Amino acid sequence: MSGWTVQRIPAITLGVRLAAYGLALLAAILLAGLLSVGVGLPPLRLGGTILYACFATRFGLQDLALLATPLILCGLSVLMLLRVGLWNIGADGQFYVGATCAAAVGLFVGAPPWLGLPLAGLAGAAGGAAWIALPAFARLVLGVSEIITTLLLNFVARLLVDGLATGAWRDVHSSVTGQTQRIPIVLPRFPHDWHFGPVHAGVLAAPAIALLLSLAFRFTRWGYELRLCGANPQAAAYGGMPVRRRLLQAMLLGGAIAGLAGAIELTGTVHRLESGISNGYGYTGIIVAVLAAGAPLGAIVTGLLMAVVLNGGTVLQIHGLPAAAASCFIGVVLLVVALAERLAHYRLVRLRPAALAAGRAAR
Amino acid sequence: MSGLSGLLAQAFLAGGVLAIAAFGELLAERVGVLNLGVEGLMSLGAVVAIIAVDSGTSPVGGLLASVAVGLLAGAIFAFATVTMRASQVLSGMALTLGGSGLAAAIGRPYAGEPARASFGALHIPLLERLPVLGSALFSQSLPILLAWLLLPAGLHALFHGTRHGLSLRAIGEAPGAADAQGLRVLPLRFVYVTLGAGLSAAAGGTLTLAFVPSWSEGMVAGRGWIAVALVIFAGYRPWRLAGGALLFGLVGSFGYLAQARGWGIPPTLLGMLPYLVTMLFMIAPPLLRRGGGGWAAPASLGLPYFRDER
């Protein structure tokens, strides 16, 4: 006689985790397919349309690269804080403020292009870091949860951009309301005969920063200390590490990356500061980071994946589905991934007859 | 209506919506589960209430419909976080993103339309003749009155006056010890997280049936998050929560007043005010009182319970 039992395991390998996330994603896609059957739409044809629109045309691929850049960067911003066990729900606000600071450089600093671009990037990163400074202070000095404080500032940042774009900085020469004039600082595009279209040099920033973070996490003492400060602050402090300083560095760097993403979006893709310039990138960044399982290079893949999802939402809009369907789907993916993360910590083990007999004897 | 009671009436109305949502969150947090999905629950409740009254039910029926959808979504959330012990932060974010998205999707045909029915003012005999409070509080609609009169008293009596409430608080503070006492930790957590979600969704229904009387995408506008902050600000006590909600409501109504009187404050700044003040309320109390005094969060808040780790 033999039996089966479920056993909990304290830690799982990266492979198991990735497999679980893959299965979760598949389950979410299946669920979405079933839903689309429920409302009377052909799921396979819709899926095919999305994939075709994203991958089969040059325009689709260009769109994908442009859309994935802010998603990967916001994902890296969230991931930076996850590294030390904190949540950055405010990447959206940091993105808005980064774009605002870059726009300020473009509007008010008459710098030559070679100086203007780095200045705008720096201003964006500084703005993003400044936007998380108050939540960082509240968290590290007062112990106030960073989840709610970072999130509340998203609303403030959004209103700030609304106020500037419709008020003080509005384009007075245009009939379009809610945007500034064209920002003169522009990220260079790729050589014309490469046929990259509107894709700008900013898309290189996402993989470059991911690579830098990955190397820093793996090969530097700083990266090691970050991980330990997140995993076990008491042990890290006992080991002589400056825990609070490391957490502060991680938070400010996370804010700076999201702010830089805003500056890149402004100078590369949108070229004007306008209401809704973020399109929820900061929130989608949360799932980019979580799916990447803490690996910066993984965020490149998951960022692209989420770009396909968002692009898919736009495609579905053409087919009469509401745009909110994409954010609905992202919610489902998050929930299924949270479940899969937990389920991956269990394994089914077969009880050998000897063990069973021993158990009975003990009883 | 005089200036003061007009301001107060607006504060009781706006604060009442926050209070209902926050009381729902309090139910979940007291048993140790952090529900970050309040924003999504409120969106779902708001849109379902509008759809229900549009199909001909009474406002009470609309409010019950929003409670029902909240219970359903809450049961899914509780299954994930309590039964399966999945990450509460992730599941909550999923509920917020998914709930807001779903609400926007199903509410599209109703966006901007005035509600076909909404709650009218109840005039409570005798009490409504009280000097300031009479017109500010006792002439409000049914859900707002319940938020101020029934919920704080009821939840205070439950948590701090009954043996069952003591058990619930024990589950939030020390689930291992509660389990050893024979309390059923996971079933009780499941039930109270689900009930809390129903209450938070009712706040959404109150928003569309008693406050704004119409649905539009993004109308919840962070009220769910402010409610979560309010629970922390109140130190997890029902009466303090009611007081905090009134304070938050006053801040919101100050914006209306400034706009109506034309004080020349830029509207963008007025729009930011509720969020900035919430930030201030999150940061100021721990700055002023360092530690202790019965303001702490339930000790097991956010942690899943595993019996074998006891």
Image: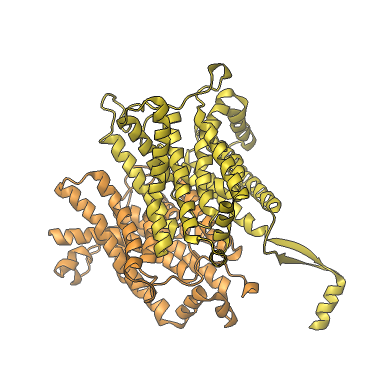
Chain colours: A yellow, B orange
Image mark count: 0
Q: Nearer the viewer, residue A138 or A361?
A: A138
The residue depicted at 52 percent of the width and 69 percent of the height is B191
B92 vs B212, left or right, is right
- The location of residue B45, given as percent across then percent down, is 42, 55
- The location of residue B192, given as percent across then percent down, is 49, 69
- The location of residue A280, given as percent across then percent down, is 45, 42
Which residue ends up furthest to the front in the rendered image?
A240
Residue B144 appearing in the image: yes
Q: Quadrant of residue A5?
A: bottom right
- The location of residue A330, given as percent across then percent down, is 54, 46
Q: Nearer the viewer, residue A5 or A260?
A: A260
Q: Quadrant of the N terminus of chain A?
A: bottom right
The residue depicted at 16 percent of the width and 66 percent of the height is B132
Q: Nearer the viewer, residue B109 or A354?
A: A354
Residue B220 appearing in the image: no
Q: Quadrant of residue A106?
A: top left
Which residue ends up furthest to the left in the rendered image?
B2
Q: Nearer the viewer, residue A335 or A197?
A: A197
Q: Quadrant of the C terminus of chain A?
A: bottom right
A335 vs B210, left or right, is right
A104 vs B169, left or right, is left
The residue depicted at 61 percent of the width and 56 percent of the height is A339
B29 relative to B106, above or below: below
Q: Quadrant of residue A211?
A: top right
A338 vs A355, left or right, is left
A268 relative to A297, above or below: above
